[in-house]
Image (cartoon, helix red, strand yellow):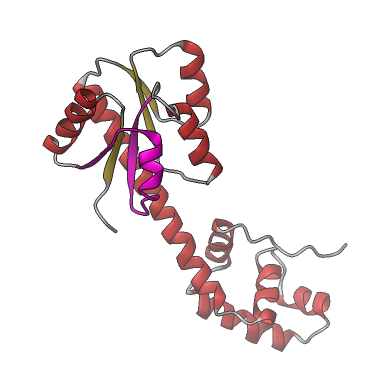
Amino acid sequence: MSDPSVFIIDDDPSARQGLTRLVRAAGMNAESFASAGEFLASGNPDGPGCIVLDVRMPGMTGPELQEELCRSDYCMPIIFISAHGDVPITADVMKKGALDFLTKPVDCNDLLEAIERALEKDRQHHAEIAQKEDVRRQLSGLTPREFEIMTYVIAGLLNKQIAYELGISDRTVKIHRGRVMVKTGVDSVAELVRLTEEIGIKPAQHGV
C-alpha cells in the first residue's frame, strides 16, 4: 500500500500554502487544490489518505463536494476548516460523515491530531477492504455445491441434517464440507461463520 496523502482544498492561496507546508513539515505527503472542481478533475486517488476541506469556496462549496463524494461512495475521511463555521453547517457535515470541523485560524496541533485520526481511520478502512477481498478470493474457489453446503454449515446444521435438506447422502455432505474447510483455510465452524459474516453471506434458510 502506498504512503497516505493529505489533500488540501482551499481557495485562499496563503492558507493553502501554509497548510501544505505544515503537513509536509510533519513528514506527510500533501497535495493542494484551489477548488473542489480542481480536486475532482485530478481523479479520485485510490491510496489511503484524508481531505482537509474549506467550507466556503467559489463554485462548489466544501459541503457540496462532500455530498458529491458521498454519492460516488468515496470514503476518504474529511476534516472541514472554516472561518465562518456555524452550528447548522457543522452539524450537517458531521452528520454526513465528516471526521472533524476546525475554525480558522486553525491550531496546528489540533489539525495534525485530526489528520492522524483521519489517516488511521482510512488505513483501517483499506485494511477491511483488503480483508474482504481475500475472503472473496477464498470463497471463489468453491463449487456451487460446496458453496450451498457451506451456507447450511454456517446455519448450524449437522451433516445428517444437511443431507436430509438437500436429499443427498451423509458421506457426500462430509466430503464437500471437508473441501470447504480446506479451500477457505479455516479450522472450525466458528471461523467459517466469521469469514462469511465479513462479506455478508447469509446462512441457508431451512425447515421452512
- Residue at 48% across, 17% down: 89
- Residue at 85% across, 64% down: 207
Report if residue 187 is visible in the image: no
Residue 51 is inside the magenta segment? yes
Report if residue 125 is visible in the image: yes
The picture places residue 26, in percent across and down from the top left corner, at 14, 36
- Residue at 33% across, 14% down: 83
Task: Identify which residue, 64 or 5, lies in the foreground.
Answer: 64
164 w.r.t. 48: above or below: below
Q: Among all residues in the image, which is located at the extreme right? A: 208
The picture places residue 98, in percent across and down from the top left corner, at 44, 30
Q: In the image, 118: left or right of 155?
A: left
Q: In the image, 192: left or right of 102?
A: right
Q: In the image, 131: left or right of 50?
A: right
The picture places residue 21, in percent across and down from the top left corner, at 14, 33
- Residue at 42% across, 60% down: 130
The quadrant in which the N terminus is found is bottom left
Q: Which residues are magenta?
A: 29-54
Task: Identify which residue, 181 or 90, lies in the foreground.
Answer: 90
Q: Quadrant of residue 157?
A: bottom right
The quadrant in which the C terminus is found is bottom right
151 w.r.t. 129: above or below: below
Residue 82 is inside the magenta segment? no
90 w.r.t. 181: above or below: above
Q: Quadrant of residue 34?
A: top left
Q: How many marks?
A: 0
The picture places residue 182, in percent across and down from the top left corner, at 51, 80
Q: Among all residues in the image, which is located at the extreme left? A: 25
Q: In the image, 142: left or right of 3?
A: right
